[in-house]
Amino acid sequence: MLIGCYTDESMEDIILVRVYGKKTELFVDRENEVRNFRILHSHSCGPELYCTFQNGICYEFVKGTVLDKWLVREPTIYRLVAMEMARIHSIKPENGHPVKPVLWKKLSTYLSLINASMIDSRVSEWFQREVPSFDIIASEIEALKKQLSEIKSPAVLCHNDLLCKNIIYNKAKGFVKFIDYEYSGCNYQAYDIGNHFNEFAGVSDVNYKLYPSQELQRDWLATYLETYKQCNSMELTVTDLEVNKLYVQVCKYALWQKRHSQNGLTPAVPGSSYAVAEDSQKQGLYQLCQVPVMQW
């Protein structure tokens, strides 16, 4: 639940209060969320966190327009998104030590939650009818881990859930900011970008005809690399070879995510919702906090 609090009708000084959903702590590391909230704010990449309480947080409201599937493909805006992501990806760990990508740990947690929820007959019946067996899913994830780890995409601080509604565009000041850090953490650079590209197709009403064109992707990636190099004190010139390399890496992660979304069980874990859908084309007949099904 998200509540906006203000003292007058002008709504100039809005404070947001978010109350966590029941049992979301089974999958979301709330301490990590708060830590990354503060890190991003300290680097001018996120709003200020005012306070925390047992089942929620209170933080600054970011003024601007929430992106949609049309705004996100406008050149002026998507280049700002690429630049902001590059800045976040350039934030170094606080202790200076390398950290492991969160992806595989989240997948392991996800599988454990699925296994635990099989005691509910409704969940068990749904999985038997709609998705491969638990053993097949587990073995496929191991194969994916081996293949994707060979891509050698660097581990960076990622948002991990950059759908359109998590991007705020301030036209007057010419910037974008990302919000909602529940799934933020160290992850593969190409994963975060590929996840964002998949979000061009929508969430509840997915249409992959809206997936960004190769031309848009390459322009996005070139803009990203320019800012990423600048933030990391690297040679500023971006070559076609560098764009091609990142493009291939991003495509591999994006295709993996897309494939599993079409199977009805998407292991794009950082951007999950806590619901089980009876039919991937419908809203779902019921919800269970124990079983997260991915949003695309």
Image: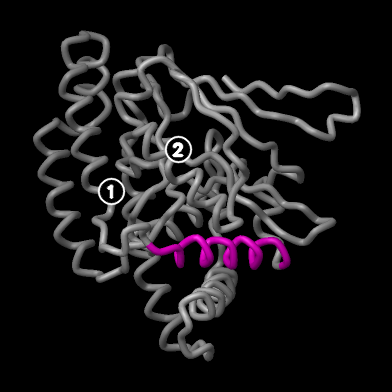
Tell me, yes or no, whether the highlighted magenta stretch contains residue 208.
Answer: no
Q: Kindly indicate the quadrant of the structure image that contains residue 254.
A: bottom left
Q: Kindly indicate the quadrant of the structure image that contains residue 212.
A: bottom right
Asked whether 264 or 232 is in front, the reply is 232
- Residue type beneath disc 1: Leu
Mark 2 falls on what kind of element?
A: helix
How far apart are the two marked residues, 1 and 2, measured between alpha carbons? 19 Å
Q: Where is residue 206 shown, x and y percent of the image?
A: 52, 41
Magenta residues, start to end: 76-92
> Which circle's residue, 1 or 2, is located before the other in the chain?
2
Tell me, yes or no, whether the highlighted magenta stretch contains residue 80.
Answer: yes
* 110 vs 219: above or below: above
Q: Which residue is drawn at 71% across and 59% down?
A: 175
Q: Where is residue 171 shown, x and y percent of the image?
A: 81, 56
- Give the label on residue 130, or none: none
Q: Does the magenta stretch mainly form a helix, a strand or a loop? A: helix
Residue 98 in the figure: left or right of residue 28: left
The quadrant of the rendering that contains the N terminus is top right
Q: Where is residue 23 shown, x and y percent of the image?
A: 35, 17
Colouring scheme, one of rainbow, by chain, secondary structure, one colour:
one colour
Residue carrying label 2: 34
Residue 196 in the figure: left or right of residue 121: right
Q: Residue at x 35, y 15 (%)?
A: 288
Residue carrying label 1: 103
